[in-house]
Amino acid sequence: MKIIRIKNQEFIKLEDEICAAIGNFDGVHLGHQILINQCKLHNYKSAVMTFSPHPSIFLKNLPNYPLLTPIEHKIDIIDKMNIDYLIIIEFDLKLAVMPKEVFIKKMKFMNIKSCVCGYDFTFGSNALGTVKDLEREFEFYEIPKHVFHNVRVSSTYIRELISYGNVTEASIMLGRRYSIRGKVVYGNQVGAILGFPTANIDYGIYFLPKNGVYLVKVKIDNKDDYLAMANIGYNPTLNFVEERRLEVHIMDFSGNLYGHHIEVFFYQRIRSEKKFNSKEELLDQLYKDKQYCIDNVHIINLEK
């Protein structure tokens, strides 16, 4: 897959004629996958056209807008879908106010002959561009909403599920386990003192699940998998912090992980975050949480 990055509205003319799937594709969920696979079915080279940073940062004035799949994660997922081109357009205030007619001209300049979009796709200044505009200018394929268990599969709904801690159903709608990537950074060493050393993960702009304890799998430096339990929250019993943390206690692992990259795959929420009355009470619960993870390791496919 060839990656094309468009910055400062400097669009590039491609040698190949293109059928482009266009959208934000945050999460690259089952509905997105149907749309993206459609662009491979026509007599052109396939391409995915997406935007980074996420348009909501500018359109909704949300500078810290969390994502299901930040751009590098999104690239890795799409790369596995056998697409010829990934076109990443830098989204900024100038692009936000670009008239729809100008954006269509830019698409034609890039040698896009055909495009695939969801039924509700909009573009251009004030979101005035619609699928009807694209139908008039290109060979166009509109993808209807994808429904699962009588619910429309969407990034918004998946975010809602994750915000409630329902990582199991969210993963079904994503077509893979919801996961967060990050680098291990220094914490306060409280877990190690308690006998439960944890890797404190810098999760960046990822969308965090609801506070609590989770059964997870971790992949270290994109190599071996390990059973682990994750805690998300503020550490209310010991070492309270004002910004939510993602920490993982990895089973059957010893070694220094600082500076290493970890991917955390969420399988099940075990319990809510709780402030315990004492260190001993906290420890007792941690042993129970760990045993639960060990007893349910069969849920996880571990690869060594």
Image: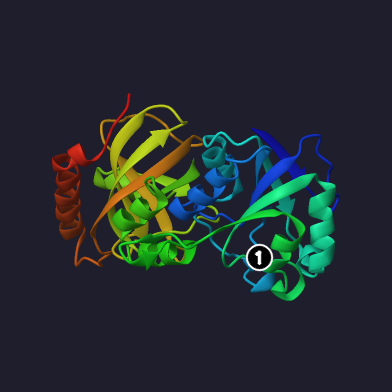
Residue 145: image x %, image y %? 47, 63
Relative depth, front residue between 86 and 290: 86
Q: Residue at x 29, y 41 (%)?
A: 228
What is the quadrant of residue 252 in the picture? Answer: top left
Q: Residue at x 19, y 50 (%)?
A: 289
Q: Secondary structure at mark 1?
A: helix
Rendered image coloring scheme: rainbow
**Does the image show residue 224?**
yes
Q: Residue at x 20, y 44 (%)?
A: 293
Residue lying farthest to the top in this orientation: 304
Q: Is residue 229 above or below residue 254?
A: below
Side of 31 relative to 106 (left or right): left
Q: Which residue is mark 1?
A: 131
Side of 187 relative to 76 (left or right): left
**Does the image show residue 185?**
no
Residue 180: image x %, image y %? 45, 48
Side of 19 relative to 106 (left or right): left
Residue 208: image x %, image y %? 43, 59
Quadrant containing the N terminus is: top right
Quadrant containing the C terminus is: top left
Relative depth, front residue between 173 and 59: 173
Q: Is residue 108 above or below residue 128?
A: above
Residue 43: image x %, image y %? 66, 37
Question: Residue type at mark 1?
Answer: Val
Relative depth, front residue between 128 and 5: 128
Relative depth, front residue between 191 and 52: 52
